[in-house]
Amino acid sequence: MRRLFPLPAPSAPAPAAENTEVGAAGPTDRAWSLHELADAYAYPAADDPVRSGRTGWLRANMVSSVDGAAHHEGRSQPLSSDADMRIFGVLRGLADAVVVGAETVRQEGYRPARAREAFAARRAAAGQGPAPAIAVVTAGLALDFTLPLFTEPLVPTLVLTGAGAPADRVAKARAAGVEVLFAGEGQGVDPARVTGALAERGHTRLLTEGGPMLLGQLAAAGALDELCLSLAPVVAVGDAPRIMNGPAVPVPERFALASVLEEGGFLFTRYRRP
């Protein structure tokens, strides 16, 4: 893996005799440790000016083919790589909670997040639990509460819904031991209230893994702070949606490029709200 942006400031010129070996090789391509990746993807500190006025920090992690497909035949795995999965694991290892749509839970066969020894000390120092909670966004709560995501989590799984959600499904979820949080007055979730609802439970370092509809709703509501986009060097064609599929915004919102890593032709980009 190599860093393409930002590059470190150039050092003082070496003597001519030494400089002949440097050439224009550019950034070094080498294996990065999990700790190096964790440092590269660290959440902004609570007192960082970029977080001014925000109750938490919501970042998204998505993968896309070069022709814009968010998945292939309903799943993101065909677009992924070993490096993409390492970054996926690091982003989970840094998060308090992972926000995901109910359809993605069903399509991807979501399971509880697991504790990883590589992040144990970092999480303990940050006051985090052993693994992130999974927070499922759903309007109708049409979920199978007998699945391991709900019956075997290391950290209790959360369900985010609206106050008008079906009362019988809310009761069924609670009977299964699931904590139900209301983040909206109607049947569904108000995307602008997701961060606040989770912050009330102490979850301020948030990660969403989509799917495209949820991510589109969060972005359109101005709730998205950061996008970690893996660009896969593959062409998928087909009719898969883009990584965001939601209501149009009146004016396209500009994000600032924060970093770019590369490995095996994959580009791992990170964009932040200015």
Image (tube, rainbow, N blue to C red):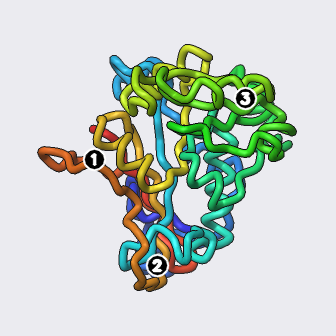
Instruction: From this view, report whether residue 51 is shown above or below residue 87.
Output: above
At x 44%, y 33%, the residue is: 188
Task: Pinpoint residue 95: horizontal percent, then vertical percent.
Answer: 62, 36
Q: Is residue 6 left or right of residue 83?
A: left
Residue type pointed to by label 1: Phe
Identified at 57% across, 68% down, the residue is: 76
Other residues around mark 1 within 10 Å, as few (<14) / some (14–19) / many (≥20): some
What whole-number distance in Å separates the C-alpha atoms at marks 1 and 3? 41 Å
Count every numbered label the image shows and give the total: 3
Relative placement, left or right, of 222 versus 155 is left
Residue at which label 1 appears:
255
Helix, strand or loop under label 3: helix
Residue designated by label 3: 172
Residue 40 image position (x, y, % from top left): 55, 47
**Amino acid bearing label 3:** Lys
| Residue at mark 2 | 25
Q: In which quarter of the view is residue 38 placed? A: top right
